[in-house]
Amino acid sequence: MRQTAAVGAMEWIGAGSLLAWVWLLLGQGFFWRTDVRLPARRDPERWPSVAVVVPARDEAEVLPHSLPSLLAQKYPGRAEVFLVDDGSTDGTGALARELAAERGGLPLTVSSPGEPEPGWTGKLWAVRQGIALARLRVGPEYLLLTDADIAHEPDSLRELVAAARSADLDLVSQMARLRVVTFWERLIVPAFVYFFGQLYPFRWVNRPGARTAAAAGGCVLLRLDAAERAGIPESIRHAVIDDVKLARAVQRHGGTIWLGLADRVDSVRPYPRLAELWRMVARSAYAQLRHRPQLLLATAAGLLLVYLAPPAALLAGLAGGDSTVAALGGAAWLVMSGTYLPMLRYYRQPPWTAPLLPFTALLYLLMTVDSAVQHYRGRGAAWKGRTYGPR
């Protein structure tokens, strides 16, 4: 009797997982596709002025690989770079000045705003300083908010502005291609972007009148008057996941937004070991769940059903000689792996790694649980010596 009940339960779990994957395949904005790139664009008659704002805290390791790419932008209009040194202790500001003196290119201003006021995250405090300086020096029509670990091809700024002008967009954001070199980067990084797309399907974000809003903080071109209408950055000054909050604020105040994958914008930050990747995910995972235990439980249950149940059902069915359970689990695992293949191709990874996605999902579940544990220990959302709690 117990064995019959267990078999029945596994059949229901396998069927539920398969139905979930059919829904994700067809009903979640085709999140698994990787063809959402910069929209059709043409050169504007007049190129608007742009201020490039780069918040930087202890970035001396990556700055030689990223800052020269910004200074070397081939932009037909006026553009200046503002690097805001957010209390670095590794000589980030001095190194930025040296790189500008050696390489030349776009004008560079380096400043330091001091420690953030209460209620501000360090990054957004630095962005505030950068925007204020840009208003005084350039009076820009657009802001390019880009992280200190992001390298741009020489035509990146030109292409972003052309896309924004052609489609009359207030915000254009590209998800930078993250570094994939070591074993752990290959296992975890493509899944990071895959899961992000599952939460915020790019096609939903880009629909006129959409209720889904998101951006990728490494590369955001923002019209200045849209930022002013939305009160950026003051209105999101407390945000840990600032890119999504920024997009929501712009959208809420009538702005049009676009989000897609990048071809010529890359993150140069290395994550050679599991520990670095673990910290990268765990520092904001529980904030993504708004620090709510019930959302954590729901997320854990969802990950178990969607990602862990298919291989479990397949193995249980094979071990118990139940072809129905095995078929349900195998079909769900096959659909899952198939949706992951486009992202693996985008990151130039071998297709045989697609069936490893359940293991990667288990790691993300453990990272999310650890994020909650660290939050309740008072060490949540820690980044380079600072810890941020809920608002």
Image: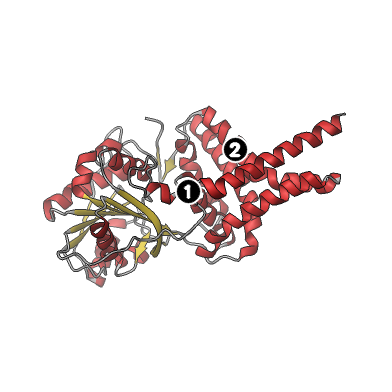
Q: Residue furthest right?
A: 1
Can you give x and y, in whole percent of width and height, for residue 328 in the image? Answer: 72, 46
Secondary structure of residue under mark 1: loop
- Percent across and percent down for residue 156 are 31, 65
Residue 69 vertical position relative to residue 141 in the rendered view, above or below? below
- Percent x, y for residue 162? 25, 63
Along the line of sight, the residue nearer the viewer: 206 or 361? 206
Question: Quick one: 277 or 243, which is closer to the camera?
Answer: 243
User: Residue at horizontal 45%, vertical 38%?
Assistant: 288
Residue in view at x 33 percent, y 35 percent: 238
**Residue 380 in view here:** no
Q: In the figure, residue 317 lies in which quadrant?
A: top right
**Quarter of the image containing the N terminus?**
top right
Residue 260, can we see it?
A: yes
Count neighbours of disc 1 (C-alpha within 10 A) and say few if under 14, some if 14 to 19, many if 20 or more.
Answer: some
Looking at the picture, does residue 306 appear above or below residue 75? Answer: above
User: For mark 2, what is the residue?
Assistant: 302
Which residue is nearer to you in this view: 241 or 2? Answer: 2
Q: CA distance from mark 2 to mark 1?
A: 18 Å
Label 2: which secondary element: helix
Q: Is residue 238 left or right of residue 285?
A: left
Q: Amino acid at mark 1?
A: Gly
Q: Residue 29 got which mark?
A: 1
